[in-house]
Amino acid sequence: MATEEDVRRAALALPGVVERPSWGRPAWFAAATLMARIWEEGVLTVKTEEREALAGTDPDTYFWTPHHERSPLLVLVRLDRIDLAELGELLGESHRIAAGRRR
């Protein structure tokens, strides 16, 4: 089970990541691009190229709202359903996508 504090530690351990609020919630940016954000308590938004696969295999953990329909790289993750290793993988991919888009 991951927590918001786990997200903070893991995100800030990645190169060049800074934390600042986005829409009143904690968010982490790589190369000035959003890479992760607390969507609501216990739910994290990250970027992934595997959104459909993740939600298809584990919809209780990975999902999106109508708000996210137009952003095919964004997925919501229920933090209480993932472990720290999975959190690290998700943040690593999101960091790669966010940092790469600004280069």
Image (cartoon, rainbow, N blue to C red):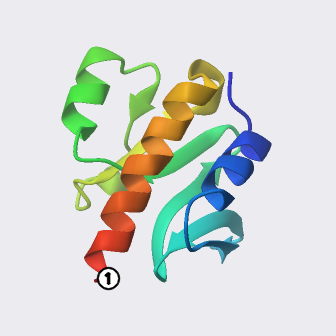
The answer to whether 84 is drawn above or below residue 103 in the figure is above
Q: Residue at x 68, y 37 (%)?
A: 42
**Depth check, front residue: 96 or 20:** 96
Horizontal and vertical percent for residue 86?
Answer: 50, 28
Mark 1: few/some/many CA within 10 Å (<14, 14-19, 20+): few
The C terminus: image quadrant: bottom left
Horizontal and vertical percent for residue 97?
Answer: 31, 62
Question: What residue is shown with label 1?
Answer: 102
Specify the farthest residue to the right.
5
Q: Residue at x 74, y 44 (%)?
A: 4
* Quarter assignment of residue 3: top right
Total of numbered circles in the picture? Answer: 1
Q: Residue at x 69, y 74 (%)?
A: 21
The answer to whether 94 is drawn above or below residue 87 in the figure is below
The answer to whether 46 is drawn above or below residue 25 in the figure is above
Horizontal and vertical percent for residue 65?
Answer: 38, 46
The answer to whether 53 is drawn above or below residue 76 in the figure is above
Residue 86 appears left or right of 73 = right
**Depth check, front residue: 28 or 55:** 28
